[in-house]
Amino acid sequence: MVLATALYRGSHLVAGVVNVSQHQRDRPIQWLLLGTAIASTALVCTAARRRGRVTRRAVGLDALVVGCLLPFGAYAWGGAREPETIAWTMLLGGSASALAAVAFGVRGTAIAVALLVSTHLVGYLLVHADAAVTATHLNALVFSAVVARVLAWYLCRQGARLDAANHRALTAEAQRARYAERITHYSALHDTVLATLTAIARGGVDANTAVMRQRCAREAAYLRRLVEHTDGGTPDSDIRTALEESVRAAEALGLRVTARYHEPPAVPGDIALIVAQAATEALNNVRCHAGTDHAYLTATGDAGRLVVTVVDRGRGFDAGDLTGGLGLDRSVHTRMRAIGGLASVDAAPGEGVRVELRWPS
């Protein structure tokens, strides 16, 4: 609205320059009045630029000086005795009316418009303007304020709607982020703390061994970070180191793992961590569901892709019937999809299971 009203005033000032140049170029008082209008406009625009909105004080002064007093100055000292010579000062009243509609409330706008209409009516009566010219000008004064007021109301309403839409979008995004964080923590708890507690509860491992105590200490540290909302640190960028941690975690729970590494490619640290977490869950599934205590883990590179496989020779299952209890959907497939990777499961009853993790897919 500041820009729109400034451009509106600018068009009236251009008309004033043309009028004075053509009809009253030899009258210094006319140029002085024109300079006063330009100075008042500059004051309004400068105040608006500093405050980010039109200010009532500057607009009120502009309406009084430019809108009301300027026509009488042109008549009394500038020799403007005909409608053509005073018209440019009257024209400025339209932009003064629009500025008032933007700066003031309904009551303030009504007062300003009434004052402008009264003074301009008197001005046109002094120069004996036609009734049609006077009526047309007064109509323009009123509707300049009406149009500016409606436009300002519309822009404010649209701005409020946009703010509300942005607030709703930010709220929804925050909810999605919190949900994703909860799912991440749930998956991590499923693959670590829950797996350890389940193994101890079943009596399959000795909870007093040094390896098991180390594992419990790591998982206790993870729970502490989770409760305190602190970061767990930067993940290791070495995929072999990350997978070795998964192997040690599985072995601490009683699963023998034969691991082989055939020049796996370098991957970003967060990718290495997530692939290792998926491998951890695949090893947990071997320990809990395969009916065997031996698994095979292989990491290699295939045309620049990281390929990690976890294989067992246990009882197997029907690959077309993956249930949530196996943890493959959320802890393996979902994790790999989240990083642009792919997890595939090859299994059959009595023939074991082969889980393949590829990144990128």
Image (cartoon, helix red, strand yellow):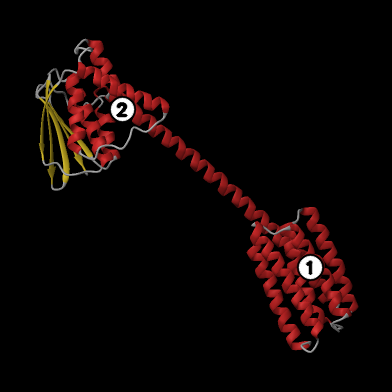
Kind of residue indicated by mark 2:
Ala
The residue lying at 22 percent from left, 39 percent from top is 342
Q: Is residue 113 visible?
A: yes
Quadrant of the rendered image containing residue 284 = top left
Check disc 1: other Cα within 10 Å, few if <14, some if 14-19, many if 20+: few
Residue located at (23% from left, 27% from top): 281
359 w.r.t. 323: above or below: below
Q: Which mark is residue 321?
A: none
**Toward the viewer: 180 or 323?**
180
Mark 2, Cα crowd under 10 Å, few <14 / some 14-19 / many 20+, is some
Name the foreground residue: 148 vs 130.
148
Dot 1 lies on which element? helix
38, above or below 207, in the image: below
Q: Does dot 2 land on a helix, a strand or a loop?
A: helix
Q: Nearer the viewer, mark 2 or mark 1?
A: 2
Q: Which residue is mark 2?
A: 188
Residue 358 location in percent, x, y?
Answer: 19, 40
Badge 2 vs badge 1, beta-carbon distance below 8 Å:
no
Provide the residue designation for mark 1. Answer: 139
